[in-house]
Image (cartoon, rainbow, N blue to C red):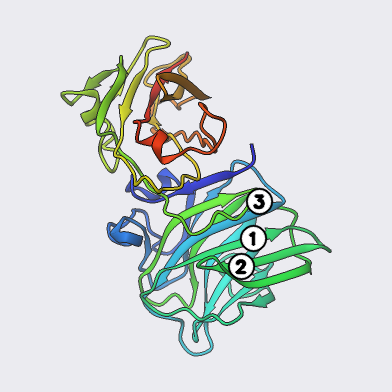
Amino acid sequence: MAGIIFQTSFDHYSTTTHRFNSTAGVGPPTTTTVGAGRNSTAGLRFTNSTSALVARTLPTTPADIWFAFANRVATLPTGTNSRVIAELRNAGTRSIHVRVRADGTLGIYSGGTTGILNGTLLGNLSGFAMLTNTFYHFELYIRFSATVGLVQFRVNEVEKLNLTGQNTGATNASEIILAHAGDAVTVNSDFDDIVVRDDDWNGDVQVRAFLPTGIGATNQWTATGAATTREAVDEAAPNSDTDYIEEATVNELSLFTYDSIPATSEIRAVVPLPFAKKTDAGTAKIKSTVRLSATNYDGAEQAPSNGSYEYHPDILMVSPDTAVAFTAAEWNAPIEIGPKRTA
């Protein structure tokens, strides 16, 4: 199903590589920072004085890609310098990047070398300049083509660039990059609410992490290091083997409830995100189960790695109960979500 292919809010983990594949440069952020995000939530903060970046390999390589992120900088580049803040890469080669200049204006470039201020200017944003210490929601849309490429850019949902017939220099994107490269003076550069889609604009939305607040209709897994299964999985950042839930029996399930949301909320997607590992040789697979209207719906099967915790997202664009977008009423009913061992 077309839709969201990657998202993160930085609120439910502390180690950057729990959701990003790699970092590069000198001093890239290896942990998230409380208060660096919008609404005083956690965010990704670059503080180093040299170029650095974090990278995420995408699960698919779409020819059309929408890349949304919120960014705030404490200072702008100096003099005639500029700074790369985001990139799309194809198999390690830079495709498109976004650069901010000393006057706060932004340019979109193709090609060049990752982390270096080179490449071909495709266009400048019209009627916009960043202010310092202000969060902006940026959304870049690229249709990759050598002859009929399309480059569009929105700031706070307002179009600021629309270029047609572009040579975008690549056929697709396999990675997204958040960066602090070029004029990387010692300064806070904060990122939050990352969403990548392959079908449409996502809009200026909050990516919100929900932690379990209660135990649901079924509670079959075993808690270790905590009094209840809910208390074993309610940390804002995973605490590894300090406390956890586990299950050796196939088809055993534990469900949890979550905080409610305002009745007027619009839900783009629900993403169950178990942080799991297997502890011995042999087959071990799980599914995220969503309970709606007293019915359990199993998601895609996942295979945790032996000995290493990893996130296993299951992006649900529509409600499995109604086959249309989730509603606030469904969430508040309440929705129940949790892991099921399937093999």
Residue linked to disc 2: 153
- Please say if 84 is above or below 45: below
Q: Residue furthest top?
A: 249
Number of numbered markers: 3
Q: Does residue 209 appear left or right of residue 58 in this picture?
A: left
Residue 141 is labelled as: 1
CA–CA distance in space, label 3 to label 1: 19 Å
Quarter residue 133 falls in? bottom left
Residue 47 sits in quarter: bottom left
Per the rendering, the mark at residue 91 is 3
Few, some or many residues within 10 Å of mark 1 (<14, 14–19, 20+): many
Question: Which of the pair 82/199 is nearer the observer?
Answer: 199
* Residue at point 68%, 76% (across, down): 123
> Does residue 212 appear to the left or right of 77 in the view shown?
left
Is the C-beta separation of discs 3 and 2 under 8 Å?
no
Q: Are marks 1 and 2 in contact (CB under 8 Å)?
A: yes
At label 1, which amino acid type do we have? Tyr
Q: Where is residue 107? Give x, y as percent.
A: 61, 76
The answer to whether mark 3 and mark 1 are in CB contact below 8 A is no
Residue 231: x %, y % from top left: 21, 30
Horizontal side of 318 relative to 208 (left or right) equals: right
Query: Of helix, strand and loop, which one carries label 2?
Result: strand
- Work out whether mark 3 precedes mark 2 in sequence or the reverse, and give the earlier one: 3
> Counting other residues with Cα less than 10 Å from the Cα at mark 3, is it few (<14), some (14-19), or many (20 or more)?
few
Q: Which residue is drawn at 42% across and 50% down?
A: 207
Query: Does residue 282 appear in this view?
Result: yes
Residue in the foreground of this view, choosing between 16 and 8: 8
Three-letter residue code for mark 2? Phe
Q: What element carries label 3?
A: loop
User: Which mark is on residue 113?
Assistant: none
